[in-house]
Image (cartoon, rainbow, N blue to C red):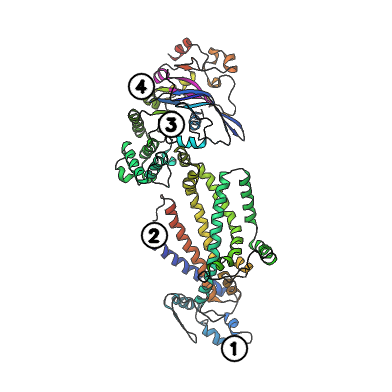
């Protein structure tokens, strides 16, 4: 187990460095000059040169990448800006503040948004999937199938906007989405994020319903489930203890992918509800050619996916004893 | 005459499918006496497994209609409530299946799977159930039961899995054990061990056994009585000696002829039963076996093709064929 985690962590670091390198060099393939953007609208050549030097853009590309990379592990000194201690993700070209601080500032919102929505869509998706599987062909199954199809087809900016209009502005049933840190007031935290959670869950639930239903139907036909019934186990225990166990593996797989993707930035959701999360940062980094910020958001997104992948692999071993971590 | 422990009368099982109604079992009757073994023999799709799933109520109630009687120790099982069936399964009637790898849960330890039956039906504690599981594993001949009890099925060999399956089936001392092709998925040496084990446990505990198989060799070694099924019906019934030594039905002859024997010369070819089993969606009129039978001319083509022969005589060695007893004896010689 420990060996597995060590090996996978090493692999994850290598993956992230490669992703960072690709992002870094792609950035310079785009004909945009961050120094000019940083320097401002009216920028005499000396100042532009100065800005270029301060941002380190006058160095060879490879040297720039190496100093960015080493900054993460040992910190880095900036002329005129002082020391940036490890892990240093650099200074934003745009707001001249350390990137790490901004990211850490935004991450709690994104994580809160992700976790809350995930709890809802996981529970609802699996529950409706089980019900649909047990009521194959009956009304409930059809309702679940149709609503999951609808859920899979609609877009967040559509449902989200409608929900905002009817639930918040027209009828004041829910609060205008707003992020309050959990540590400050758990209740306001939940109340402020409830609408984005529900809207996000609405779209993701569909996937879980369909996946749970089809796997559950398969599992219910398995020999070992028949054996459980032949042993006199109650219908409930046959489903919850036997069939569900085999259903969990594919569900956990997509859950890992979804969580990773959402932490990387629920860009549309954040935009729809005016929430300032990591997704918003990444959009702004792209439009303002803010390389350090862009690198940081890419790292968060890739890191989340890599980490959840490892967690999912570990989960497999807990769900299915036939899986060996080696 | 005492009433048999299990008595099935006129059992009919129909599945409603998209293609039509599948007549899986048609008016089947048989008895199992206490402490004896009934072998049910037939090709795939002859209704042998369906019959026994029905005894345990394991059919899908959505698309199945059942009629007839299944009396276990005097209690009617058809139409019994779900909770009373749950109490029965694994307790009074247990079942073991063909493939022990897929039939055991891959997600739970052997000990847990055995123990939970005991906990469910006997209200035992976790610790008691574990002790009982170890005791059962010892009984079915698993070496080092104290450590193997915590193993998962994939850590067991095929024969050991079937032993564990038997341990699980017998943990509550059932009165009736239904073994659905218990040795088909195992290699030959292990087959013999498993059959011996079943026999020994039967002698010890007085369990009645229904042994479903397509292997007449297995029946010869373990069963007391035999029921030969074809297209959802019984075509021959009797003691092992009667059915295997003086078989009366052309289908039984076919089955026996298609079985390799050590005693016959190497160059005597095996004779398969010609043709294929009928679709149960559309069972031929008259004797269901007539399209594959070599003796239709002799028995009377009109009769064979139009009217279904009943199992006769009513008790003892009976078969469903229009040939006269003298003709059958003559042919079988």
Q: Is residue A266 visible?
A: no
Name the residue at the top extreme: B326
Mark 1 to mark 2 CA distance (whole Å): 54 Å
Q: Which residue is mark 2?
A: A4
Q: Report the disc number at residue B178.
A: 3
Is A72 left, or right, of B285 in this rendering? Answer: left
Which subunit holds the residue at mark 2? A
Residue A167: image x %, image y %? 66, 63
Q: Secondary structure at mark 3?
A: strand
Q: Is residue B167 visible?
A: yes
Q: Is residue A63 above or below residue A187?
A: below
- For the record, the magenta segment spans B226-245
Residue at 61% x, 63% y is: A195
Mark 4 to mark 3 CA distance (whole Å): 31 Å
Callout 4: 10 Å neighbours few (<14), some, many (20+)? few
Q: Do the residues bearing badges 1 and 2 touch, measured as CB atoms within 8 Å?
A: no
Mark 2 to mark 3 CA distance (whole Å): 45 Å
Mark 4 to mark 1 CA distance (whole Å): 106 Å
């Amino acid at each position: 187990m420990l060996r597995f985690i060590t090996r996978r962590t090493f692999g994850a670091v290598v993956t992230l460095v490669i992703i960072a390198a690709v992002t870094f060099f792609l950035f310079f393939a785009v004909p945009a000059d961050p120094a000019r953007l940083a320097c401002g609208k009216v920028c005499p050549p000396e100042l532009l040169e100065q800005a270029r030097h301060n941002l380190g853009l006058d160095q060879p590309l490879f040297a720039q990448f190496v100093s960015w990379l080493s900054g993460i592990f040992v910190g880095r000194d900036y002329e005129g800006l002082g020391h940036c201690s490890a892990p240093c993700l650099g200074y934003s070209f745009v707001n001249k503040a350390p990137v790490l601080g901004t990211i850490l500032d935004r991450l709690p919102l994104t994580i809160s948004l992700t976790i809350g929505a995930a709890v809802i869509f996981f529970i609802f998706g699996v529950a409706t999937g089980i019900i649909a599987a047990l009521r194959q062909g009956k009304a409930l199954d059809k309702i679940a199938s149709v609503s999951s199809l609808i859920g899979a087809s609609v877009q967040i900016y559509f449902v989200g906007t409608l929900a905002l209009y009817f639930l918040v502005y027209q009828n004041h049933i829910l609060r205008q989405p707003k992020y309050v840190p959990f540590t400050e007031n758990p209740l306001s935290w939940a109340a402020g994020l409830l609408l984005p959670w529900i809207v996000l869950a609405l779209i993701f639930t569909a996937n879980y319903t369909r996946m749970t239903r089809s796997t559950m139907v398969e599992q219910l036909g398995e020999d070992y489930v028949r054996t459980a019934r032949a042993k006199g186990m109650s219908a409930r225990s046959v489903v919850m203890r036997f069939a569900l166990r085999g259903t969990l593996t594919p569900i956990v797989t997509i859950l890992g992918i979804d969580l990773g993707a959402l932490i990387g930035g629920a860009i549309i959701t954040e935009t729809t509800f005016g929430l300032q999360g990591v997704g918003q940062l990444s959009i702004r980094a792209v439009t303002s050619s803010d390389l350090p910020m862009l690198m940081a958001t890419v790292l968060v997104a890739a890191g989340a996916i890599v980490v959840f992948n490892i967690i999912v692999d570990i989960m497999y071993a807990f769900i299915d004893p036939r899986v060996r971590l080696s | 005459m005492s009433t048999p422990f299990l008595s099935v009368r006129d059992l009919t099982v129909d599945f409603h499918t998209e293609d039509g109604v599948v007549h899986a079992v048609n008016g089947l009757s048989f008895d199992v006496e206490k402490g004896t073994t009934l072998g049910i023999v037939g090709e795939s799709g002859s209704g042998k497994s369906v019959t026994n799933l029905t005894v345990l109520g394991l059919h899908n109630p959505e698309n199945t209609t059942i009629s007839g009687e299944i009396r276990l120790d005097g209690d009617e099982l058809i139409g019994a409530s779900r909770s009373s069936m749950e109490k029965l399964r694994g307790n009074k009637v247990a079942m073991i299946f063909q493939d022990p790898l897929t039939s055991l849960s891959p997600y739970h330890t052997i000990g847990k799977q055995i123990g939970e039956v005991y906990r469910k039906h006997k209200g035992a504690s976790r610790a008691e159930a574990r002790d009982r599981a170890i005791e059962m594993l010892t009984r079915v001949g698993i070496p080092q039961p104290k450590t193997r009890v915590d193993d998962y099925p994939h850590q067991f060999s095929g024969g050991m899995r079937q032993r564990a399956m038997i341990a699980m089936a017998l943990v509550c001392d059932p009165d009736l054990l239904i073994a659905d092709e218990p040795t088909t998925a195992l290699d030959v040496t292990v087959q013999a061990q498993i059959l011996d084990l079943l026999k020994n446990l039967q002698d010890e505990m007085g369990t009645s056994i229904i042994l479903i198989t397509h292997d007449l060799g297995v029946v010869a070694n373990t069963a007391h009585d035999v029921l030969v099924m074809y297209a959802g019906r019984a075509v021959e019934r009797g003691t092992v000696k009667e059915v295997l030594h003086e078989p009366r039905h052309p289908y039984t002859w076919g089955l026996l002829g298609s079985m390799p024997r050590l005693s016959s010369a190497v160059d005597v070819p095996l004779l398969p039963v010609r043709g294929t089993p009928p679709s149960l969606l559309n069972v031929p009129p008259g004797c269901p076996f007539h399209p594959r039978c070599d003796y239709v001319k002799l028995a009377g083509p009109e009769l064979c093709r139009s009217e279904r022969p009943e199992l006769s005589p009513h008790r003892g060695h009976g078969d469903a064929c229009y040939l006269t007893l003298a003709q059958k004896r003559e042919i079988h010689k």
